[in-house]
Image: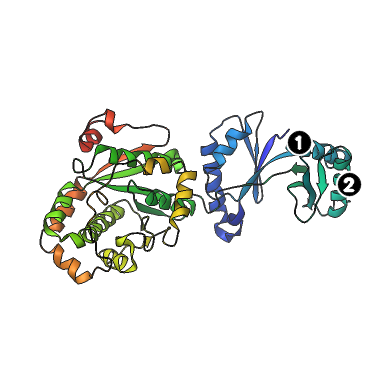
Amino acid sequence: MYERILVRYGDLTLKGRNKRIFVERVNHLIREKVNNPNVTYEKNHDRLYILLNGEDHDAVIRGLDKVSGLSSYSLITKTDRDMDSIKAKALEAVQSELDDKVVRFKVETKRADKHYPIKSPDVSKQVAAHVLRHTELLQVDVHNPELTLNVEIRHNGAYVYCKKIKGMGGFPVGVAGKGMLMLSGGIDSPVAGFLAMKQGVEIECVHFESTPLTSIESAQKVIDLTEKLAVFAPGNKLKLHMVPFKELHEALLDHVPESYNITVMRRMMYRISEKLAKQRDCLVLINGESIGQVASQTLESMVTISDVVRMPILRPLATYDKLDIIAISRRLDMYEISTRPFEDCCTVYVPKKPTTAPKKRRSGYYETTFDYETMIDDTVARTITIDVHANKHRDLTSEGWIVRDVLTDKQ
């Protein structure tokens, strides 16, 4: 019975002079993610109507679920403003939602057109009475309803709907600028990337690969996770920078005491990420650090590690509980990928007793024992950048064994 979808922008409408930019951006993302030339769009002040024109509404909603910046949306039907038409559509809408159990029910009416001759409470009473006379499974409960029938009376017609589907919220990807996501193959960093995108940050990803010290499957995890993130990105694709970390990795193992190995490794990763971020016009670094989760994520470690860069660092998961992070990962269909038993360079050589309170001076001293600056410049120069598409899967294991040969020769 529903012939259109009502899309609500939420906080975007509070942006004052910037409102137009935000709304245009989110409308562009809606068209891109819905990707259906048969649906049409009607703009109306602080909302958007998607006319289905016979298309599957579930497919359209799946597209909307990938758009950040939307407060909610509803399957909705439009009718004439006379009470007989409103009552008929209201009954049809309620009947489409009922099954075989008693449902607590209420009617809410909003008059955008204040000149409409019947006041909102009276519309609700008339509609509720009509619906109750023609159904058997409804029980009025205005305080705690399970089903709310909404009637909106506007200048161009009356609109009837029953459900509000929660959108992603936040802001459309790109309006907040660009950040460089330090992406591992674990659970946390891809979730952090999603949360940054949800708040309007466009991202590029950087991954530190150490094949053959680490397996090609660990690099494949990152490709697959980037594909999952790309469904939320403009154009359904993301840039992934694959950093050849093997030589630096080996130098760290040879020159840095075991207890400081992860600390100094992370400092190298931060330096490289900042260089790449500046090359790509990124404003911030983003990572999946959560306070106290591992030795390198104590406050003392964070201070010592981040001391080597000047670029701001976003940590969307800083105060998240691990179970909450896992729940988001599962919802995004990333958890099974992240928990594949293939480790990256941050986890394959975890020291038995890593320091939880590393000192800046001591970390800097260990770094003087080898020429890390030259190695960093060489590493940045040899970094490979690839476009990862949401709907174009790439299987590294079927293309070859050494990941850098695969990415260089077969892009």
At mark 2, the secondary structure is helix
Question: Could you say where residue 16 lies in the image, as x and y percent from the top left?
Answer: 59, 60
Q: Is residue 391 visible?
A: yes
Residue sitting farthest toward the front: 352
Whether residue 154 is visible: no
Q: Earlier in the sequence, mark 2 or mark 1?
A: 1
Query: How many neighbours does mark 2 have within 10 angstroms: few (below 14), some (14-19), or many (20 or more)?
Result: some
Q: Callout 1: 10 Å neighbours few (<14), some, many (20+)?
A: few
Quarter of the image where the C terminus is located: top left
Quarter in which the N terminus is drawn? top right
In the rendered structure, the answer to whether residue 361 lies left or right of residue 199 reads left
| Residues at marks 2 and 1, CA–CA distance in whole angstroms | 25 Å
SS under mark 1: loop
Q: Position of residue 241 (x, y in %)?
A: 29, 45
Residue named by callout 1: 100
Q: Which mark is residue 280?
A: none
| Residue type, mark 2 in image | Gln
**Relative horizontal placement of residue 54, taking residue 299 as reference (left or right):** right
Q: Is residue 181 left or right of residue 19?
A: left
Residue drawn at point x = 37 percent, y = 44 percent: 338
Left or right of 194, for residue 184: left
Looking at the image, residue 359 lies above or below residue 296: below
| Amino acid type of the residue tagged 1 in the rendering | Asp
Marks 2,1: beta carbons within 8 A: no
Residue at screen point 80% across, 54% down: 142
Q: Quadrant of residue 84?
A: top right
Position of residue 212 measured from the top left corner of the image (x, y, whole percent): 19, 40
Where residue 200 appears, as percent x and y from the top left, is 47, 53
List the residue tagged with mark 2: 126
Q: Is residue 175 above or below residue 302?
A: above
